[in-house]
Amino acid sequence: MIERNPKRSEDSPLRRNLTKLRRNKAAVFGSTLILIYLIVALLAPVLFPGNPSAPNLVRSLERPSLKNPLGTDELGRSILGRIIHGSRVSLLIALGVVLVGLMIGVPLGLVSGYYGGKIDFGIQRVTDTLLAFPGFLLALGLVSVLGVGLKNTIISVGISMVPIYIRLVRGCALSVREQTYVEAARAVGTRDSAILFRHILPNVMVPITIQTSLGMGTAILFAAGLGFLGIGVQPPTPEWGAMLGSGRAYLFHAPHVATFPGIAIFLAVLGFNLAGDGLRDVLDPRFRL
Amino acid sequence: MFQYVLKRLLSTIPVLIGISLFLFIMLRMLPGDPAQVLAGQMASPEDIKAIRHQLGLDRPIIVQYGLFLNRLVRFDLGRSARTQHPVVKEVWARLPNTVLLAVAAIALACLFGIPAGIIAAVRPYTWLDHLFTSMALFGISMPVFWLGLMLVVIFSLILQWLPAGGTGSWKHLILPSFTLAAFVVAFITRMTRASMMEALSQDYTTTARSKGLKEEVVIIKHALKNALIPIITVVGLQFGLLLGGAVLTETVFAWPGMGRLIVDSILARDYPVIQGTILIFGLLYILVNLIVDVLYAYIDPRIRYD
């Protein structure tokens, strides 16, 4: 009699959040965009067989047509084909960048927040220094030292994200370390590493997840910016920013060359931003903007 | 107030030391001999030897850092490997253009973003709110360099109203500053909306309304005044984003600022100029944050006494 709907009470927080997320139209739209990009990236060789970088000068700078729905670039390559294959590069960059940020930023943030004192002071001064440079400029500076290319783009943009993760995780770790369950774990002699990764880390997963989604959008934008400037991923790799950069030279008589890669970047970043915003609204409404 | 400014000035010292260390390490991370890199490809062995001695590269690392700091304090950043001009001269020549572009963009962004945020907060969940918040999200997601190129296509190629690039008149400033403003307006709109919504839900706003004050007075005098701190914070923070965006915008519009200088220097591997530009960008960012902090203390005197 008391439990009229036992099924409802058994709802896990995960299921509840998923239901909330499904009701958030913007988040559903964002997640759908990401899903489409993922499918396109996975099926790229099926959707556009052949080498997307192979030149065909006879078809140089053709306008959109039935044969080439988005037209061709200066070397006669299908822009649609290069955008399809470029989705693999951009998603790889987004994943790689976030991984670099997470792998360096999360442990440093945890240690900084949990131990405090001199360790915290040292890590925070390094963070302050990195934050003194706008993210894109930091990535630019690092690329100038490491050199151009896919790997160095991922490392440079990834490092530019590290201070954001450090600050985020440190803030959460600072508040969690004072909780009774952490004190209890310490009192029964649990090792620091176990406390950090078993008790504190799960409690900072929500902001990390949100930041990761938003960070992927930023990573795609930064990497495309570097590619556009000619100091990111190098041609003939089909990277959207580099495609846009080379299309700039033909802006006045073939504007389609620069237009479509830009739309591809915009929709991918929009997808990650909408999904990130949706996650924040559902998981951490305090930070809703 | 003076004490507060002094305290805030002193707190930038560790960051300045950090920046100097970053630049020092950056140069040491370069593959090969830094003296060779600084001297450029065409330098003779004698030149390289002279630079090595001049930079103290033949001395212990701590002495090298000391010498580097000494030169940095005197703004002696060496000479450009490309033009052989002093780096400081090259950077200073470009600085006013970047500052002009950044100030124009931030002014435009505030001019649109703050009213849009206020309207969205005053009429939450209406079509106007949805319109402004959607525009904000689009602005955040749009690659600035693509937007710039599209504006060139529309306003220079099709309508032929504005020049596609370069400098010389106020007309040249319009497209680059709009492009750069679109990049930051989104953050300002979102933050204004959020902080205004919070201010409008506070007791003091209800009290002001119950006193029979006009709605405009409640919004501007009571809510906006209290919502200003987070708005100023976000404007200050966006300045950094704007400097990053300036690199791309200046490239799109062939605007002769520091952003283009750094890109050209990276492409030419002109490290002294890269170092100098990064240093000035860092200093500019610190300066803006300092101004923002002083503004806080001016707007909210409680901060001074904390």
Image (cartoon, coloured by chain):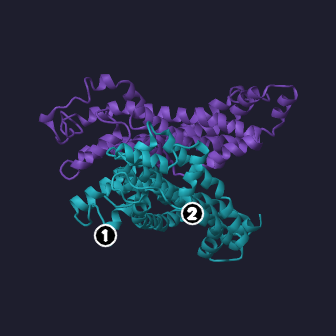
Chain colours: A purple, B cyan
Q: Crowding near pointer 2: few (<14 within 10 Å), some, many (20+)?
A: some
Q: Secondary structure at mark 2?
A: helix
Q: Secondary structure at mark 1?
A: helix
Residue sitting at x 50%, y 66%: B110
Q: Mark 2 touching mark 1, by CB under 8 A?
A: no
Picture coordinates of residue A49, whole percent (x, y): 26, 23
In the rendered image, which quarter contains the N terminus of chain A?
top right
Residue B171 tag number: 1
Residue sitting at x 42%, y 41%: A223
Horizontal side of residue B244 vs B261, given as left or right: right
Say whether mark 1 and mark 2 are on the same chain.
yes
Residue B209 tag number: none
Horizontal side of residue B6 vs A242, given as left or right: right
Subunit that carries the residue with mark 1:
B
Q: Amino acid at mark 2?
A: Leu
Residue B287 tag number: 2
Above or below, comparing residue B47 to residue A275 in the picture: below
